[in-house]
Image: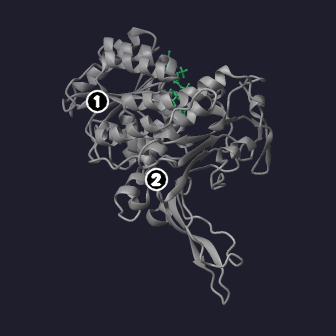
């Protein structure tokens, strides 16, 4: 993967995302020698500071992020030489003019950059103004030919809209100024090794795909559990809640990768076409029936790792009567040939007992139990668990005979661990996705129709919850797996929520 000389502009360079993820990712890529001569980073923020202070601030941010490890002075010196700062308010067109002049001055030097990548690492309320000013002040303008150089690309962070309607509106606005091939809607989950591995696992092996359907699979469970609470992002989270924060993007992305048909090639549009088909096949939840398919929760006080923690409503910046769900659990049905009748259970929440994200595919039990029931009362179904984080890996559960004269069966796990096999993931999700964007590969980014289709899945839930009576919050204690009602989603089915 050869990164071309280019300029990365980070709007919001003093924000949380830039500090914790983007700068460490770019530093790491510098350390690994993946960024060529002529690669430049320009940070834009409101803080009144010179370039030296900005570089020092970025050094501290990198040192604090645990992804990059300790800062190496020699690597940082190389990184700092390509790091520049432009001060400006992003509501003010003059800031974009100053930025363009800075970029043009750089572009006169050799080696000439082959493109500009602008990262919108700013609050979503600023996206419309930023896109418009970037275009009007000629920082990021429309390029019609996807193969043209110099190229211009824009990374837009989540959340992309608050509903299908607002996502559509944002897409329309973005498209007034840029072509679709220039727009990279980022979902950092897709940069994780294990997430990409779902497609490799399914389509590069011949033994799994034949059983990957309603004939053999009982149900699929997708979990993204966090132990943290709302931390310092109460303002954002109060507006977003669990469904907008986790389901519209990350969990539905995991569902599409698990459920999609094999694309004809591993190209951006072929992969995304198949993902959109899955999203379009998810049965729409209808008013009146939402409660049978969707459960919301909000944590009260409890204990995490033996330490008492406050409830959501007691967190700083949260309304004392907040109706924001910190957990949601859904049962979705994919109405197509392959998945008819197979429930997909999705669950994500804050302040759960363990930090774990996984896709668990549970197979049907054998049709006939020939072992005497007295000795083998129940078989554990076969299960493939793809662990996205932490301890990235994969396990396959099957029954074995316990050694001994008596016939006894026991489920065992055959496990593959990325850390054991390869010493862990080589690059963070943001490194992977930044490199993909710089090299023009949009496979792991959401297309226009894809984000809108994902919103169409969750909109009815959000609307019903907003219009209905207040929820009996808090309804789960911090440090537990969520409200009891979430178990009702399995009514009539064979499974129950895993506690991975
Ligand atoms: N943080 C995460 O882990 C995370 C994860 C996924 C997605 N995101 C998304 O990434 C984006 C950035 O998030 P964040 O957490 O980094 O937000 P943040 O900490 O609030 O940072 C936003 C940045 O934007 C700057 N900014 C705000 N208004 C501005 C203006 N008018 N002119 C110039 N700069 C302005 C801020 O500058 P000041 O310092 O001057 O206020 C700050 O540098 C958001 O869209 C968020 O939803 C964040």
Vertical side of 166 occupied by 52: above or below: below
Q: Residue 204 carries which label?
A: none
Nearest the camera: 137 or 247? 247
Q: Is residue 415 visible?
A: yes
**Residue contact at pointers 1 and 2, CB within 8 angstroms:** no
Drawn side of residue 294 relative to residue 180, left or right: right
Q: What element carries label 1?
A: helix
Name the residue located 38 percent from the left edge and 38 percent from the top edge. 277
Q: Which colour scheme is used?
A: one colour
Q: In which quarter of the image is the C terminus?
A: bottom right
- State left or right for residue 302 relative to residue 232: right
Q: Identify the image quadrant of residue 383.
A: bottom right
Residue on which disc 1 sits: 181
On screen, 346 above or below 376? above
Residue 158 appears in view: no
Q: Is residue 496 left or right of residue 97?
A: right
Residue at 77% across / 23% down in the picture? 321
Residue bearing mark 2: 194
Q: Earlier in the sequence, mark 1 or mark 2?
A: 1
Residue 115, image x and y in percent?
A: 26, 30
């Amino acid at each position: 993967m050869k990164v071309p000389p280019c300029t990365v502009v980070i709007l919001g360079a003093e924000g949380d995302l830039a500090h914790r993820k983007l700068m460490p990712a770019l530093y790491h890529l510098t350390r690994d020698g993946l960024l060529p001569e002529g690669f430049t980073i320009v940070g834009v923020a409101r803080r009144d500071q010179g370039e030296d202070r900005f570089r020092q601030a970025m050094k501290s941010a990198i040192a604090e992020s645990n992804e990059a490890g300790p800062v190496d002075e020699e690597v940082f010196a190389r990184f700092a030489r390509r790091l520049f700062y432009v001060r400006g308010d992003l509501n003010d067109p003059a800031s974009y003019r100053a930025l363009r002049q800075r970029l043009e001055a750089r572009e006169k030097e050799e080696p000439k950059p082959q493109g500009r990548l602008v990262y919108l690492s700013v609050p979503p309320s600023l996206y419309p103004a930023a896109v418009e000013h970037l275009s009007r002040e000629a920082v990021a303008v429309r390029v019609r030919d996807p193969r043209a150089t110099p190229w211009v690309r824009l990374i837009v962070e989540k959340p992309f809209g608050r509903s299908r309607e607002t996502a559509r509106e944002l897409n329309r606005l973005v498209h007034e100024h840029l072509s679709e091939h220039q727009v990279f809607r980022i979902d950092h989950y897709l940069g994780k090794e294990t997430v990409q591995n779902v497609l490799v696992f399914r389509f590069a092996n011949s033994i799994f795909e034949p059983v990957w359907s309603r004939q053999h699979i009982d149900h699929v469970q997708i979990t993204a559990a966090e132990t943290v609470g709302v931390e310092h992002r109460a303002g954002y989270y109060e507006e977003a809640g669990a469904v907008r924060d986790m389901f519209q993007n990350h969990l539905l992305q995991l569902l599409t990768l698990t459920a999609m048909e094999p694309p004809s090639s591993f190209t951006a549009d072929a992969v995304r076409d198949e993902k959109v088909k899955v999203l379009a096949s998810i049965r729409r939840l209808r008013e009146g029936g939402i409660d049978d398919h969707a459960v919301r929760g909000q944590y009260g006080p409890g204990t995490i790792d033996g330490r008492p923690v406050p409830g959501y409503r007691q967190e700083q910046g949260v309304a004392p009567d907040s109706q924001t769900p910190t957990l949601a659990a859904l049962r979705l049905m994919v109405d197509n040939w392959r998945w008819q009748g197979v429930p997909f259970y999705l669950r994500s929440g804050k302040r759960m007992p363990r930090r774990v994200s996984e896709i668990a595919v549970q197979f049907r039990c054998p049709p006939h139990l020939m072992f005497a029931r007295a000795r083998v009362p129940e078989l554990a179904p076969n299960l493939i668990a793809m662990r996205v984080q932490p301890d990235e890996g994969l396990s396959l559960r099957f029954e074995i005979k316990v050694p001994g004269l008596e016939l006894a069966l026991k489920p065992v796990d055959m496990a593959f661990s990325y850390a054991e096999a390869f010493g862990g993931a080589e690059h963070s999700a943001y490194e992977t996705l930044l490199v993909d964007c710089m090299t023009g590969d949009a496979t792991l980014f959401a297309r226009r129709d894809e984000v809108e289709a994902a919103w169409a899945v969750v909109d009815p839930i959000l609307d019903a919850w907003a219009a209905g009576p207040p929820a009996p919050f808090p309804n789960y204690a911090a440090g537990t797996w969520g409200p009891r009602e979430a178990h009702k989603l399995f009514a009539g089915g064979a499974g129950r929520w895993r506690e991975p």
